[in-house]
Image (cartoon, rainbow, N blue to C red):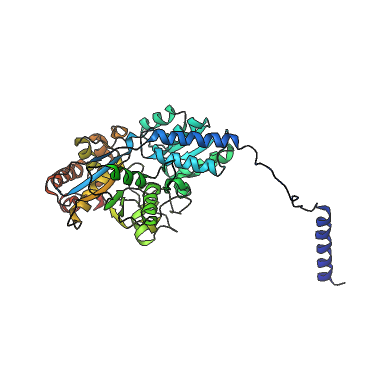
């Protein structure tokens, strides 16, 4: 027998001996009938989540005082009025519900999440309801008020460099037999987040809620916003609204408001940064909690939940201008965080440039996502702004943008156009 033939014979003999020694798999007999075990805790946990949904109710809508555009309503949905203080309350509810339904979180499962702070606080709140441990992996630049908020709901906090949050969260979950929620990759899997349905247990979808509120407001003639404007961190909220609008054929233009050194504008418009990192293009301080920069390549389902297919338009705004817009909001009695400034600036730009309806008011819906006091020591602090935004033109640029936006509130002009012409860009020009 030749060497190759001998090799084949020996190999087949070894395999056949292994197969002989291995017991054959058998099918269960028919008829058979069994219950899946250990579902009692999950059923109770889901009931508790629905009880929480009822308590959440609807966060309020309010009209921004925009005297320069008398035929335009900018409607802010005040998500800072949620039970854990931010937009992320409904998001965390939906993520937890998904994790329960699909069996990722069971009794005693430690939950880990990478967050800039707001999602972590809301997840800590939800995990506290279920009595499961929660650990937040946050950037080492996080505002201490956010750390305090997370701990108030029983969460643990681990600080790491901004770009390393996902790596550490995944590693800690694996080492501790826990579940890494990964809001950046799993927002679209939290199906209830973007589905309404007609069931008595009401959806947590944000745009569904806006439509319900406008429909029930007898003083509101326009029942469907012409535009929905919002910034993005994970991309989950704007994508959930976009999916809702597209699925139900709603005539609302979904506008992503992006920060200056975020890659999302180019990701959505041109399909860039799916295979290359934009980390080297990021310029600090950014707008905390929003934009995509230092985390490397944007991989949908892994590091981002941004769905470019459901976005209609993208507007990119300067970070220092958005910071000035935060101050404008606060002076108008609507103190909000970083995304609120980006949202206001973008909404004013759209209001100034849009073709107005002939027979109705133009309605722009946007969000006040979290409270301004989270940022008292940072984006509302002139010394901090002078230091952190030095490369952007410092206080000279900040004060210039504040003046421009203030003027445009009265005149109705486009603040982005005027600010670009008048305000310094520092070393970034």
Q: Is residue 406 left or right of residue 341?
A: left
Horizontally, residue 38 falls left or right of residue 396, namely right
Residue 3, placed above or below residue 247: below
The one nearer the camera, 172 or 194, is 194
Would you identify the image quadrant in which residue 120 lies? top left
Left or right: 420 as drawn, with respect to 36: left
Residue 281, image x, y percentages: 35, 52
Exactly how many numbered labels are in the figure? 0
* Foreground residue among 289 and 398: 289
Observer-nearest residue: 395 or 322? 322
Residue extending farthest to the bottom is: 2
Q: Going 32% across and 35% down the picture, which residue do you hit?
A: 80
- Which residue is drawn at the image coordinates 44% and 34% (left, top)? 52
Residue lying at 49% horizontally and 40% vertically, measured from the top left: 96
For image coordinates 84% across by 57% down, the residue present is: 17
Q: Percent position (x, y) of residue 356?
A: 18, 56
x and y, in percent, of residue 341 in the image: 26, 43
Question: Given the current orientation, which residue lies at the most extreme right position?
Answer: 1
Q: Tell whether 213 sits left or right of 65.
A: right
Image coordinates of residue 206 in percent, x first then y, are: 36, 44
Screen quadrant of the N terminus: bottom right
Is residue 223 visible in this depiction of the protein? yes
């Amino acid at each position: 027998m030749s060497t190759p033939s001998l090799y084949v014979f020996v190999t087949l003999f070894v395999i056949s001996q292994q197969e002989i020694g291995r017991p054959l798999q058998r099918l269960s007999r028919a008829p058979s009938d069994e219950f899946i075990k250990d579902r009692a805790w999950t059923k109770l946990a889901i009931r508790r989540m629905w009880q929480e949904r009822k308590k959440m109710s609807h966060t309020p809508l309010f009209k921004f005082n925009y005297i320069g555009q008398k035929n335009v309503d900018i409607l802010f949905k005040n998500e800072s009025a949620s039970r854990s203080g931010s937009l992320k309350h409904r998001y965390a509810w939906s993520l937890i519900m998904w994790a329960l339904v699909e069996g990722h979180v069971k009794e005693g499962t430690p939950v880990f999440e990478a967050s800039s702070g707001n999602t972590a606080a809301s997840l800590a709140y939800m995990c506290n309801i279920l009595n499961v441990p929660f650990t937040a992996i946050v950037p080492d630049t996080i505002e201490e008020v956010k750390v305090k908020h997370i701990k108030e709901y029983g969460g643990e906090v681990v600080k790491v460099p901004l770009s390393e949050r996902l790596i550490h969260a995944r590693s800690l979950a694996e080492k501790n037999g826990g579940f890494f929620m990964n809001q950046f990759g799993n927002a679209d899997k939290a199906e209830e987040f973007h589905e309404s349905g007609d069931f008595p247990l009401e959806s947590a979808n944000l745009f569904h809620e806006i439509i319900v509120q406008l429909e029930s407001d007898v003083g509101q003639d326009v029942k469907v916003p012409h535009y929905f404007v919002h910034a993005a961190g994970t991309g989950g909220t704007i994508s959930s609204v976009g999916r809702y609008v597209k699925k139900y054929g709603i005539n609302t233009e979904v506008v992503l408001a992006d920060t200056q050194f975020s890659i999302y504008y180019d990701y959505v418009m041109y399909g860039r940064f799916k295979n290359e990192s934009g980390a080297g293009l990021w310029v600090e301080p950014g707008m905390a909690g929003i934009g995509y920069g230092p985390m490397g390549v944007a991989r949908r389902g892994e590091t981002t939940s941004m769905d470019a297919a459901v976005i209609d338009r993208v507007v990119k705004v300067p970070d220092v201008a958005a910071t000035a817009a935060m101050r404008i909001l606060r002076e108008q009695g609507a103190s909000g965080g970083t995304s609120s400034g980006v949202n206001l600036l973008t909404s004013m730009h759209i209001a100034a440039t849009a073709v107005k309806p002939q027979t109705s008011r133009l309605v722009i819906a946007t969000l006040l996502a979290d409270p301004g006091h989270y940022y008292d020591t940072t984006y509302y602090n002139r010394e901090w702004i002078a230091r952190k935004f030095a490369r952007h033109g410092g206080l000279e640029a900040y004060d210039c943008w504040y003046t421009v936006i203030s003027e445009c509130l009265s005149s109705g002009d486009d603040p982005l156009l005027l600010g670009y012409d008048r305000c310094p860009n520092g070393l970034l020009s």
